[in-house]
Amino acid sequence: MLKLIVEHTYPSFATRDSSKPIEKRDRTCAVARVLDRNDTSVKSNGMPYVLTMVDSPDASTLWVAEASCFPVPSSLGAEEALLAVPLASALYLWDRLGLELGEVAVYTEGSDFAGLIGQVAIWRGGLPVIRLDHSSVEPALDQGECLSIADQEEALRRLQLRIKDKPGVAAVDLSGRPEIIDLILEVIPRWGRVMLAGRSQQRVTVDFYTNVHRKGAVLLCEAFDPLSILEKRERASYLSMAFRLVEKKDIVETCSRLVK
Amino acid sequence: MPDWLIKILLTVYTKIPPALRPTLKELFVKSTLRVESLAKRRQIIQGKRVEFLDFEIAHLLPYELLGPGPDEVLVEAECSLISPGTERAVLCGLPGARRGFPYIPGYSTAGKVIKKGKNVKGIEIGDRVAGRIKHASHETALASTLFKVPPGVSAEEASFIELGIIVLQGIRKAAIKPGERVAVVGQGLIGQLANRLARLLTPASLVAVAPSRNRERLAVLSGGVDQYLSLKENQDCVHAVKADVVIEAVGTPQANVTAMQCAREGGRVVLLGSSRGLTRDWDVWNVAQERNLTIIGAHISDMPERDASPQRWTYAQEGKLFLELVETKRLNVADLITWRAKPEECNAVYEVLAEGGRDHVGITFNWGA
């Protein structure tokens, strides 16, 4: 176990997601210094700071298993290190969906991280990257598109038109809303990949035969959690990719804007 | 033409004095074309095209071709792009690229449709198209193999179509993820296109590795690499690259090993350059096995004809995507052209190419000029 003194936390990650289980609502990630027996700062794998999960945004000193701490490259500040966590989660999400250069990427409203997820799709070469949204208030990302779903039938028609003739489509639902899930499953073409990542509060009626079985579609069912990457087996590889990205000023600026 | 007739004609041909052969051959070709023209009711079109007459000898020569068949269109070329690796290999008779002469080079051209066959749908006279067409002022092609050039994409840009597809299929196989470190070994046309396409996938770092700094200026332009390493200055620089993904874009047997040396342990190496010849003395254990490398072959001929699958799109899909990337200004290729030649200059162009291409990257023939 390592003794840590927390320097920065990102409280807003967890607390604003009211659909999360109560016991997880306060959990967040933190950048902390490692202390030795004399409470003097020491380095972990040569790095002065580590990234870890904490049970409360107010935590100050805690003991954490060494395996749960990720050294933060010394080139990064605390803010960048914290941004790397949701970024790594978004990288993981599109990797699970296998989004390729030139494929259509569809994502939805329903998460404070939707913008970041859309941006990562653009960074992966998605073309076009389409946000499904009830309102047209949310501005489309640079190089992204926004499609209003206020009128379901019109949205279906326009989305079908946009997807037509494209070699591949990957979509993520972050809303958990039946009408959006329905729209995505209806529009997804052969071999489409869909992630149901919103916390669905209602039951959904799905024509599995037509929209999944016959299309050879892949349905990934989980809930998107911007911190969950820290608990996944693949965390090291995704965190290191995210750390490298947030070393770039323009990427930090974009992520900060989208995660606020 | 049936085999027995070819045999008889060849026997007759060998009995003719050599001095008379070229004239008689030309006469024969013209006569058969006219017979075919009458039989198929297709007009004879006059054009000019580049021909390799022998090793390192290229000329622009007049030629005749039949007008388009039912499923074909006649394309008047605006711009054709030289594929430096393949064309140089044929011109110089490099291993793996031996062809008979005369040889008609070229396979990446943009132009305008001036005639179409009766079965052709979706392409109209006056449409701008691009595809696998030789360096010729006029050429017929199956309409189904061509791509319509979107408005806003110039003929010069569209002439990159085939090279773009070649590189796209390799980049796709590389499966680059945002935040990965990427290296491109070789900075010729394929390498520079690989830089630009890899950049679209947001790598954490993009490093060019090349024999010299001759092509550095182009490589570091907007949309290009972050760092440029010259092997001439430091042969051992490859070991410090440690890239997650390495794109080999040189096309020599030794470059395969250089690319592997640039990879980190567990990295992926995509063999995109056509490395004709044998890679000798490959230290399999130290270079690849011990470092758990994944080596991926990527040649345009491996693309599926139908039905794409993950990391394997069809030729038509990649071509359409290439033009879309150019149209939406995500990909800039025009600044990779370093020599806009007239077709009449083909002799000089191929002389330079035979010498190794000097500092040139993209060389086009502008047919409309």
Image (cartoon, coloured by chain):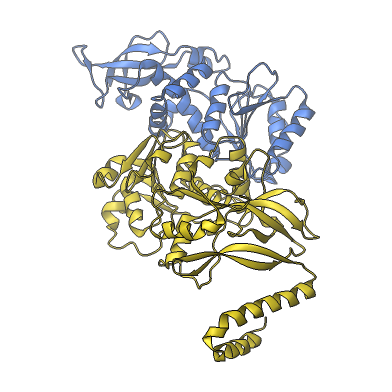
Left or right: B82 with respect to B131?
Answer: left
> Measured from the top left, where is residue A93 in percent x and y?
52, 32
The front one of B345 and B64 is B345
Tell me if residue A109 comes above or below residue A99 in the rendering.
above
> Measured from the top left, where is residue B41 in percent x and y?
80, 70
Tell me if residue A257 comes above or below residue B40 in the rendering.
above
The front one of B240 and B328 is B328
> In terms of image quadrants, where is residue A130?
top right
- Who's the residue at 36% across and 45% down the image? B214
Q: Quadrant of the N terminus of chain A?
A: top left
- Who's the residue at 22% across and 11% down the image? A39
Which chain comes out blue in the rendered image? A
Which chain comes out yellow in the rendered image? B
Left or right: A34 with respect to A259?
Answer: left
Counting labels gives 0
Whether residue A223 is visible = no
Whether residue B75 is visible = yes
Tell me if residue B141 comes above or below residue A40 in the rendering.
below
> Measured from the top left, where is residue A125 in percent x and y?
54, 36
Left or right: A77 with respect to A166?
Answer: left
- Who's the residue at 42% across and 28% down the image? A245
- Who's the residue at 29% across and 52% down the image? B287
